[in-house]
Image (cartoon, helix red, strand yellow):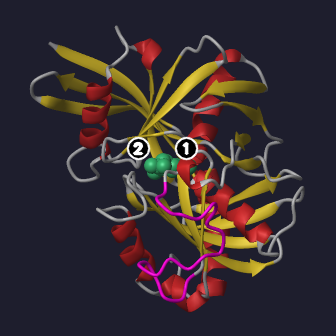
């Protein structure tokens, strides 16, 4: 039997996803199917190509539910860029301007933000924020890892570990360090067999541009380097604020390889608001055969005006990156 599955290709800061509304399927896919779809469809050579799949379904306690599967088939507890796209989808489906989305570990608020000059913007809540190592999980005797050296990883960098609620390891770095191969080496280590992170961790390097402006590059667990990671940019803003590079209750501009977002850290740092695009690229349908896998896919509708508007935002970010690092993409 062949199953025809409609999907929408979306992105938040060019962190791209296939969004699947389970209400359009005869039955919700089980975990094994979701894993197989993620591995097969996210493959940029043999599949459709994406960083992950967002599975949307009805929720008994919120306006909708979202689950995120990484490109390697693992399920994560949260996805900030994905939640802006899923939130937009539920906002349009329900006709409300503010909604609540049930994610794996929390019910989170999503709001239609005032429209930017170019693209519609959405604000999502990133919480709960925790620094206790069990929440990542991370193996350590310390109560918290805040600006700590982890000798197995680097002799010079200071790391902060936190969950929002997916796990993040963050270091504030120099321009030279940002352009070095260190992030890839460290990320490969902590996402393989390692003494610290049994479930792996998202690794971000943060370059403070000036007060209230940072650049963040993330190696995502289950994916590799992505153009941007929403939860990482939120966690990085909080780490920047704790180190005096940003203020709480005041917008932080976060540049990334796919554009830029704004974050606002609450007064006591217990939540972060992430504001940015949730862009539709195209709608499509794929055909899935239980035994043989992907049996083809096609685009059914494009959103060229959204793409053109986002490309203008992206150009502005590229100019900034070139001005700071002397290259178009870090
Ligand atoms: N891209 C996401 C995070 C997706 C999950 C992450 N790779 C993990 O395994 O924790 C975001 O925008 O937050």
Residue 81 visible in the displayed image: yes
Residue at image location 41% in from the left, 43% down from the top = 52
Q: In terms of secondary structure, where does tag 2 sit?
A: strand
Q: Nearer the viewer, residue 219 or 150?
A: 150
Of marks 1 and 2, the one in the foreground = 1
Few, some or many C-alpha atoms within 10 Å of disc 2 (few <14, some 14-19, many ≥20)?
many
Q: Nearer the viewer, residue 152 or 244?
A: 152
Q: Position of residue 277 (x, y in %)?
A: 66, 47
Mark with earlier residue (1, 2) = 2
Rendered position, 43 above or below 233: above
Q: Position of residue 284 (x, y in %)?
A: 38, 30
Residue 286 visible in the displayed image: no
Instruction: Answer with left or right where residue 225 lies relative to residue 240.
Output: left
Q: Nearer the viewer, residue 231 or 296?
A: 231
According to the picture, the residue beneath numbered tag 2 turns out to be 52
Q: CA distance from mark 1 to mark 2?
A: 10 Å
Q: In terms of secondary structure, where does tag 1 sit?
A: loop
Q: Is residue 156 magenta?
A: yes
Magenta stretch, main secondary structure, is loop
Residue at image location 28% in from the left, 19% down from the top = 4
Residue at image location 54% in from the left, 67% down from the top = 204
Q: Nearer the viewer, residue 89 or 157?
A: 157
According to the picture, the residue beneath numbered tag 1 turns out to be 79
Rendered position, 201 above or below 278: below
Q: Is residue 51 magenta?
A: no
Report whether the residue tagged 1 is closer than 8 Å to ligand 1: yes
The answer to whether mark 1 and mark 2 are in CB contact below 8 A is yes
Q: Which residues are magenta?
A: 138-157
Report whether the residue tagged 2 is closer than 8 Å to ligand 1: yes
């Amino acid at each position: 039997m062949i199953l025809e599955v409609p999907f929408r290709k979306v992105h938040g800061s060019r962190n791209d996803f296939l969004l699947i509304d389970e209400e359009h399927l005869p039955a919700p896919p089980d975990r094994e199917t979701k894993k197989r779809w993620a591995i097969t469809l996210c493959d940029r050579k043999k599949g459709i190509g994406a960083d992950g799949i967002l599975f949307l379904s009805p929720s008994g306690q919120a306006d909708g539910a979202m689950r995120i599967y990484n490109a390697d088939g693992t399920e994560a507890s949260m996805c900030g860029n994905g939640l802006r796209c899923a939130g937009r989808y539920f906002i349009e489906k329900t006709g409300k301007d503010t909604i609540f989305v049930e994610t794996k570990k929390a019910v989170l608020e999503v709001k239609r933000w005032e429209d930017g000059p170019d693209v519609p913007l959405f604000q999502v809540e990133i919480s709960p924020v925790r620094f206790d190592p069990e929440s990542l999980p991370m193996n350590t005797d310390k109560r918290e890892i805040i600006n700590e050296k982890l000798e197995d990883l680097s002799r010079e960098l200071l790391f902060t570990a936190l969950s929002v609620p997916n796990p993040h390891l963050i270091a504030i770095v120099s321009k030279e360090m940002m352009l070095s191969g260190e992030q890839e080496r460290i990320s490969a280590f902590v996402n393989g067999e390692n003494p610290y992170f049994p479930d792996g961790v998202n690794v971000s390097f943060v370059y403070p541009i000036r007060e209230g402006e940072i650049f963040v590059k993330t190696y995502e667990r289950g994916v590799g380097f992505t153009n941007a990671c929403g939860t990482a940019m939120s966690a990085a803003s909080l780490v920047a604020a704790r180190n005096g590079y940003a203020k709480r209750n005041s917008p932080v501009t976060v540049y990334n390889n796919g554009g830029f977002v704004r974050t606002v850290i609450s007064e006591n740092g217990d939540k972060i608001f992430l504001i940015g695009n949730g862009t539709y690229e195209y709608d499509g349908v794929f055909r899935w055969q239980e035994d043989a896998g992907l049996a083809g896919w096609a685009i059914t509708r494009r959103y060229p005006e959204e793409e053109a508007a986002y490309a203008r935002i992206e150009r502005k970010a590229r100019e900034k990156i070139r001005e700071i690092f002397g290259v178009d993409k870090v």
